[in-house]
């Protein structure tokens, strides 16, 4: 990755926030109305044609986004087995066949610019072996199309959805349609796409928005060719088709069109005052966020006056349930200058969703950071730590709210001097705290408890530079799992990663539910597979109770330049089923945009929104089976609701 | 019906209704009820505090202590405030009392008037359990005097009867940037959990947009006597806060004379 390019893309994101001029109709024929491909060029197999919903047996779920016509690019209908050019498109070694393209060259009167389009990619390859991973991509270029496998011009790509976890292509999977065979067909006499067979039917259109300010082609003039391309990977059989509509070049993205988004907080302005002889400026904003495992409860640290009792804009913890009114955590009043370091929310207990909130906060400007637990049901505050001259940070809380794991630099808790270690609070009558990392100057950080099982809160995953199992003599930060209870000694520790070199990053450990060793899996972000390709999500599936062995699987991949910056493993609370869902934030280094979404493990099935700037904080839960993503952002995502660009709380519900 | 009686009834109905409303509805979620003079339950009976103990302030921050400071007072008897027994309070230069153990918990500072109540205070070390006698950016005037006293038998009789009281007094205090002066006392009736705020001279410049009321430690419940653009208490008046319903108002003489059943 060219750093200057990354910087430039990020700068674009910032620029978009400042000023979005009125959209111009850069592509005159954006929706193919009137059965028209005017202005567009087709290529490859030329299997590209305009159709209507009535031409697809079963129709289009949710209808056609704009007008009644749209365009289909087919990987050649009717399982044609000969003809067409081939290429290596997605950076693996398997040849793509039956390539069809649709392109248009436009001159863009504003800059920067984004490409926004509605798409769906049904595929009959869904139940086929992994190598038959049909795909499509979108490229932006000037003049001659870039030769494959060039990736720098690719701004969007997807491959066929899969029935079973397998992701042969380097592209993210398109919408999963379920495993029921419905056998849809495109039928339009004389059309190049007629006869295209779509075994699992068609998913509804979804909107994508990507930046197209590729630095290889500086302007002005901003003349660009936009090319959509489909291909059949590994063979010429089993059809796939890309449906496109409402293809537009715009000054900015509208993420609200991509997912059901709610802005949960509304704060205005900023606070300026003379204090202690100086001028003090404070933006009114949300700074910390956590979401309960059920996706219904948001805890936010904000200095906004969300409940009417905070006219002086002092940071407090507020709770919102099901998008009702915000309620302040009245048991922990934070003084001016104090702040919240981190939040965590438990599961449902005693009928109260997100009953317990773990809060790491300094209550005055000069205080140290302590851990507290707020019981929403009884309005009781438990003082988990009461220390001085040291800090207790980054709590993780189990489902029942009875265990809190956190970082501590307090010798009274860690018996490790000032070295930061992970400790476990198990409450009870003695307010018990367990130090388990031992002494020394090595460091533990970012704990994450398992949740929801007969062993709720028994396991904690964390990062550590300590040599807990004898396999970390080099003192790298590795991912570990600790079992609180059972057999004593080092067998309580499982070392999940074992890497060398300073270029390897292992971070953000997460845990699953764990009523058996096999389900007590550990998830983490790492670049251990390829330090040059950014961070990806990994799962380590334990194969025995002590997790001394297991299988590591990379759960995310895709075009080079996707860098996962945060994720949260989700658990299904409704029926305690083990699921592969997680929510993520990733930086698309090609576009410079941030993508926030939900993904189902190795299947690559995901739904994401594109934002012009990174989010702050990420949380998520499964409300029944519906993923809910919580995050903080300064972007005016729902146009007009955050024009002052204060950092607000948002939620996005995957429909 | 006798016309005079009808007229009297029409005259009294609003007052009776108002009285019932005050009597039946607490002023805040916790249950404090609020009365103002000339309500006979809330007389403005100024207490002579010449023999009281002068209080020296400690600065909350960089500003002068008499501008932005506090002083700890240990109460000889506990005072129950929002259901919690309190043994110490911090007297602020800015016209409020906060129930707190020390100046690390409450520094007496203040920048803006909190309106409405309850509200998170904006000083750096703040207890939210407060009696805002007159919360504003105040300072000691040229002749300013701050003192307190405890009386085993309070010179001002509580609405519930005689008891011990602790009294804090700001005298010749002033609003920063104005010539508006303030004389006021907070009387804590220990046995009856009654708080009486007595006002002497109150300059309009001093009371403008000030906050008057009490609130609990969580800043989740408050009895508000005024703030912002609402009318402040007048000079030489009193505002009283009762933990629970106050005792019955003495029977109205006119009402008794006119409607008592004949012997």
Image (cartoon, grey):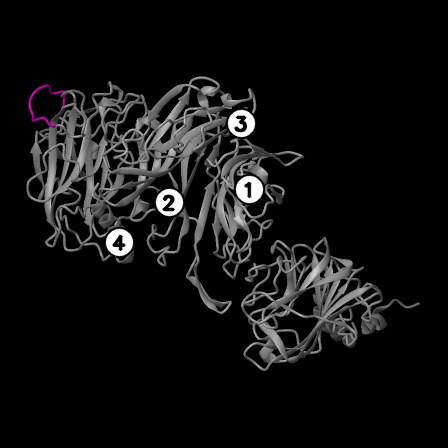
Label 4: few (<14), some (14–19) or many (≥20) C-alpha neighbours in 10 Å: many
Choose mark 3 or mark 2, whichever is in front. 3
Q: What residue is drawn where x is 45% and y is 47%?
A: A288
Q: Helix or strand or loop: what does disc 3 sit on? A: loop
Residue bearing the label numbered 4 = A16
Magenta span: A77-87
Spatial separation of the CA atoms under disc 4 and disc 3: 46 Å
* Res A655 visible: no
Is B159 on the left or on the right of B238, as rendered?
right
Q: Helix or strand or loop: what does disc 4 sit on? A: helix
Residue bearing the label numbered 1 = A410
Which chain is home to disc 3? A
Indicate yes or no whether the magenta region holds residue A539: no
Which chain is home to disc 2? A
Indicate yes or no whether the magenta region holds residue A80: yes
Residue bearing the label numbered 2 = A261
Q: Using the image as rendered, state which of residue A46 and residue B159 is in the foreground.
A: B159
Residue bearing the label numbered 3 = A458
Choose mark 2 or mark 4, whichever is in front. 4
Same chain, marks 1 and 4? yes
Spatial separation of the CA atoms under disc 3 and disc 1: 23 Å
Is A593 on the left or on the right of A583, as rendered?
left
Q: Helix or strand or loop: what does disc 2 sit on? A: strand
């Amino acid at each position: 990755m060219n750093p200057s390019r990354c910087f430039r893309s990020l700068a674009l994101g910032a620029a978009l926030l400042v000023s979005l001029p009125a959209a111009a109709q850069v592509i005159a024929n954006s929706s193919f109305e009137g059965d028209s491909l005017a202005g567009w060029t087709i290529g490859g197999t030329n299997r590209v044609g305009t159709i209507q919903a009535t031409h697809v047996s079963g129709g289009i779920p949710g209808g056609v986004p704009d007008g009644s016509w749209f365009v289909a690019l087919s990987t050649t209908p009717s399982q044609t087995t000969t003809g067409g050019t081939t290429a290596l498109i997605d950076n693996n070694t398997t040849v793509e066949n039956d390539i069809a393209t649709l392109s248009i060259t436009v001159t863009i009167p504003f800059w920067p610019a984004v490409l926004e389009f509605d798409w769906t990619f049904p595929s009959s390859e869904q139940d086929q072996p992994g190598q038959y991973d049909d795909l499509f991509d979108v490229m932006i270029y000037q003049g001659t199309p870039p030769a494959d496998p060039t990736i720098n011009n690719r701004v969007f790509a997807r491959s066929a959805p899969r029935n079973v976890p397998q992701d042969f292509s380097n592209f993210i999977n398109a919408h999963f349609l379920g495993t029921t065979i419905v056998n849809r067909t495109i039928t339009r006499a004389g059309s190049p796409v007629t006869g295209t067979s779509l075994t699992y039917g068609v998913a509804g259109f979804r909107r994508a928005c990507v930046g197209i300010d590729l630095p290889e082609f500086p302007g002005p003039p901003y003349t660009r060719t936009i090319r959509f391309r489909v291909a059949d990977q590994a063979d010429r059989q089993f059809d796939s088709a890309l449906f496109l509509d409402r293809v537009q070049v715009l000054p900015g993205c509208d993420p609200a069109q991509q997912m059901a988004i709610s802005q949960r907080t509304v704060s205005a302005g900023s606070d300026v005052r003379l204090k202690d002889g100086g001028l003090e400026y404070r933006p009114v904003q949300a700074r910390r966020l956590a979401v309960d495992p059920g996706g219904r409860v948001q805890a936010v640290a904000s200095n906004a006056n969300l409940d009417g009792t905070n006219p002086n804009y002092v940071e407090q913890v507020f709770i919102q349930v099901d998008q009702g009114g915000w309620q302040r955590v009245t048991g922990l009043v934070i003084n001016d200058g104090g702040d919240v370091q981190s939040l965590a929310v438990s599961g449902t207990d005693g009928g109260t969703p997100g009953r317990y909130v773990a809060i790491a906060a300094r209550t005055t400007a000069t205080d140290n950071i302590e851990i507290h637990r707020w019981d929403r049901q009884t309005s009781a505050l438990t003082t988990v730590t009461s220390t001085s001259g040291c800090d207790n940070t980054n709590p993780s809380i189990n489902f029942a709210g009875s265990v809190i794991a956190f970082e501590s630099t307090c010798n009274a808790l860690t018996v490790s001097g000032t070295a930061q270690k992970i400790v476990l609070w198990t409450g009870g009558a003695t307010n018990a705290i367990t130090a388990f990392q031992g002494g020394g100057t090595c460091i533990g950080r970012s704990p994450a408890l398992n949740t929801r099982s007969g062993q709720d809160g028994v396991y904690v995953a964390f990062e550590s530079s300590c040599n807990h199992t004898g396999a970390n003599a080099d003192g790298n930060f590795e991912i570990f799992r600790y079992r609180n209870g059972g057999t004593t000694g080092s067998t309580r520790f499982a070392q999940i990663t074992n890497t060398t070199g300073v270029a390897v990053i292992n971070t953000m450990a997460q845990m699953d539910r764990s009523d058996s060793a096999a389900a007590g899996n550990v998830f983490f972000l790492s670049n251990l597979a390829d330090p040059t390709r950014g961070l990806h999500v990994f799962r380590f599936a334990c194969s025995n109770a002590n997790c001394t062995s297991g299988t590591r699987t990379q759960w995310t991949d895709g075009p080079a330049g996707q860098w996962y910056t945060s994720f949260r493993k989700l658990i299904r609370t409704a029926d305690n089923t083990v699921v592969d869902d997680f929510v993520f934030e990733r930086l698309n280094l090609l576009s410079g945009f941030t993508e926030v979404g939900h993904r189902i493990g190795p299947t690559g099935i995901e739904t994401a929104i594109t934002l012009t700037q990174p989010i702050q904080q990420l949380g998520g839960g499964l409300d029944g089976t519906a993923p809910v993503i919580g995050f903080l952002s300064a972007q005016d995502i729902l146009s007009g609701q955050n024009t002052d660009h204060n950092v607000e709380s948002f939620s996005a519900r995957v429909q | 019906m006798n016309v005079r009686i009808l007229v009297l009834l029409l005259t009294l109905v609003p007052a009776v209704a108002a009285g019932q409303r005050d009597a039946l509805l607490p002023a805040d979620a916790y249950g404090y009820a609020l009365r103002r003079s000339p309500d006979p339950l809330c007389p403005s009976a100024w207490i002579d505090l010449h023999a009281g103990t002068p209080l020296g302030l400690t600065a909350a921050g960089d500003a002068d202590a008499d501008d932005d400071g506090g002083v700890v007072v240990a109460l000889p008897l506990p005072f129950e405030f929002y259901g919690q027994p309190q043994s110490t309070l911090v007297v602020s230069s800015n016209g409020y009392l906060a129930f707190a153990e020390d100046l690390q918990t409450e520094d007496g500072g203040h920048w803006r008037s909190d309106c409405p109540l309850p509200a998170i205070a904006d000083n750096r070390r703040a207890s939210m359990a407060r009696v805002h006698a007159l919360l504003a950016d105040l300072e000691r005037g040229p002749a300013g005097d701050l003192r307190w006293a405890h009386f085993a038998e309070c010179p001002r009789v509580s609405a519930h009867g005689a008891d011990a009281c602790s009294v804090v007094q700001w005298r010749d205090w002033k609003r920063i940037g104005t010539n508006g002066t303030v004389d006021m006392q907070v009387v804590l009736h220990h046995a009856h959990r009654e708080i009486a705020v007595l006002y002497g001279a109150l300059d309009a410049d001093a009371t403008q947009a000030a906050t008057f009321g009490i609130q609990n430690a969580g800043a989740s419940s408050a009895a508000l006597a005024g703030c912002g653009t609402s009318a402040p208490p007048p000079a030489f008046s009193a505002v009283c806060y009762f933990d629970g319903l106050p005792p019955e108002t003495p029977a109205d003489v006119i009402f008794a004379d006119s409607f008592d059943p004949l012997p």
